[in-house]
Image (cartoon, helix red, strand yellow):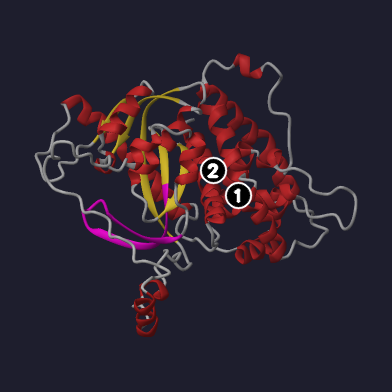
Amino acid sequence: MMKFSKQTPNAREMDANRRELIMQRWNVIQHELLPELRNDVGPLTPPLEKVIHLLEWVRIEEFTGAGWCGVGRPPHERAWLANAFVAKAVLGLTTTAALIERLEIDRALRRICGFPMCKKLPSEATFSRAFEEFAEERLAERVHEALITEHLGDELIGHLSRDGTAIIARERPARTAVESPADTAQPDLLSTQAETASGASANPPATPAPTKRRGRPRRGETRPPANESPIQRQRKQTLAQMLEEIPTACNRGTKCNAQGYKISWNGYKLHIDTADCGVPIAALLSSASMHDSRAAIPLSLISVDRVTNCYDVMDAAYCSIELHEHCRSLNHVPLIDHNPRGGEKEEFEPADAIRYNERTVAERSNARLKDEFGGNTLRVQGATKVMSHLMFGILVLSADQLMRLRQ
């Protein structure tokens, strides 16, 4: 995409606050970049102007490396393809074929993404290979992290709302490990008779595990320790170990919606930390069957490296003593809705109840991701590609919310 010098070397030092910086970038794009593009490609529609603004905000071409070393046929510029995938999320195009068709008929969009007018567009297979490379390199995730760190890293955020949302996928659920019929089959009668005649058995039957006795243990009786919960185990692990244990295979998930009804879907679950200004701070993908509480600790550790917040706001699915203690260990105030689990529900204090209402920003963020930026139009398979597709949408959503802060 066309680049212009936007700031002097000491422009950041002259900024009084973040809003003035946002207004500076907005004015430069409006009064310098857009008029020159209009002279080059003609009139621009409002959606194309939005594409220009968001591409200038995310600067994704700065994170794409050159893949050609001078031997063989030179590949298509990866920066152009990355710009095209950002434009795909902004314009709400559902498939790569629709993106290529739009680029063929829309001269302005083709020029905005950087494709030369005198050359043929890359094929659909080239777009797919480039997207696979972007997914493996976590391009959208790295650009989003840099965007959040640059614009919100020095800001104090009041509330960070954590929530998980269903992601419907077009792929078969992963098969769970089941016991083979040979393992559960009854022993053959002839072999049993032969073993009886010889007086020995090659494979003696396994002794069943002793059942756990109810009540207090007897004097001198030792019982095995109770199984450790995943959240308790996570508090002893590093972030890399937590992420490694999170399941990412496609399967079936069930949860209660905002109206209290149970819904089921086939696919994944996306966990997002959203700031009270509506900007997604961090995201994590898991299997649809994983409980939301298992993503709370690793997601909080990712967010704490990017921004500074005061309150962690979560719904009743995250109600746990361990999560309360973890939030306090990060010097955050936990605002977690109480889950009575058959007992008496504990209500918030009046001031905390008002602060808990900030959690609706997570619902709005999830809705915008699905309705406007491709969350409901998933056409790829595999956790790596699914995460890349969703992160392009989150990247565009974050830039769009940052642009709204100028108002």
Mark yes or no: residue 43 visible.
no
Q: Residue furthest right?
A: 71
Which quadrant is the C terminus positioned in?
top left
Residue at screen point 70% across, 46% down: 38
Give the amino acid type for the residue marked by disc 2 in the picture.
Leu
Residue at screen point 45% across, 51% down: 247
Q: Is residue 135 left or right of residue 397?
A: right
List the residue tagged with mark 1: 86
Residue at screen point 56% across, 38% down: 144
Q: Is residue 248 left or right of residue 332?
A: right
Q: Main secondary structure of the magenta part?
A: strand
List the residue tagged with mark 2: 395
Residue 29: x %, y % from top left: 64, 35
Residue 78: x %, y % from top left: 73, 50
Q: Which residues are magenta?
A: 250-270
Q: Residue furthest left?
A: 344
